[in-house]
Every structure is written in C-alpha cells, then in structure tokens.
Amino acid sequence: MRAVMLAFRANSDFAAQVDQLARFSGVSRSDYVRQAVEEKNARALAERVAFLSHALSTTHRQFNEELD
C-alpha cells in the first residue's frame, strides 16, 4: 500500500498538546495522529453499522408483522 500524506490546519496550542502527548506516549506526532484518526474511524464505522443494523431489523420486523 502506498503512503499518502494528509494535512490539516491546527492552532499552535493544539499542535503543542499533540506534540506533548505524543512524546508522553513514546510515539511520533505522525503516529499519534494516525492512531487517533484510526480510533475515530473505528467508532464512526461501528456507529454506522449499528444504525444500519437497527434500520434493517426494524424493516424486517415490520415486514414480518405484515405477513402475520
């Protein structure tokens, strides 16, 4: 897989906080931000799956009730 650079703007306080927390965690700033985004993506995907699962179960329940 080819690496792609992502960039975003942040104020200096936020950047300093990220740098400090990355150092405390023993990882580079890049790895710290990558891990944070991976965790956010995992939560967002789980929320989406839960939403779709609920929607699908509701549809199936309604369909089954119509058959009865």
Image (cartoon, helix red, strand yellow):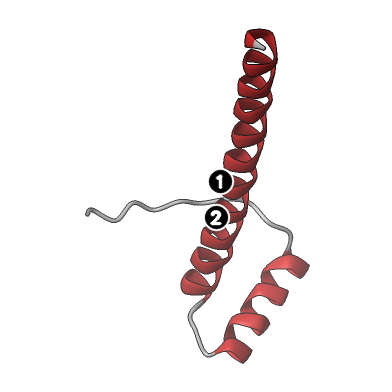
Instruction: Find residue 21 and name its label.
Output: none
66 above or below 41?
Answer: above
Task: Tell me: 43 left or right of 30.
Answer: right
**48 left or right, relative to 27:** right
Q: Secondary structure at mark 1?
A: helix
2 vs 59, nearest the viewer: 59
Label number found at residue 45: 1
The x and y percentages for residue 62 are 69, 16
Q: Residue at x 52, y 90 (%)?
A: 26
Q: Are marks 1 and 2 in contact (CB under 8 Å)?
A: yes
Kind of residue sitting beneath label 1: Leu
Looking at this rendering, what residue extends furthest in the left direction? Answer: 1
In which image quadrant can residue 50 be found? top right
Where is 21 relative to 12, above or below? below
Q: Residue, x 60% and y 35% (percent of image)?
A: 53
In the image, residue 4 lies at what x, y percent? Answer: 33, 51
Q: Where residue 18 sits: x, y (%)? A: 65, 73
Using the image, determine if residue 32 lies above or below residue 52.
below
Q: In x, y percent, where is residue 17?
A: 72, 75
Q: Residue at x 63, y 90 (%)?
A: 24
Q: What mark, if any, has residue 42 been given in the picture? A: 2
User: Residue at the top extreme?
Assistant: 66
Point 55% across, 55% down: residue: 42
Q: Amino acid at mark 2?
A: Ala
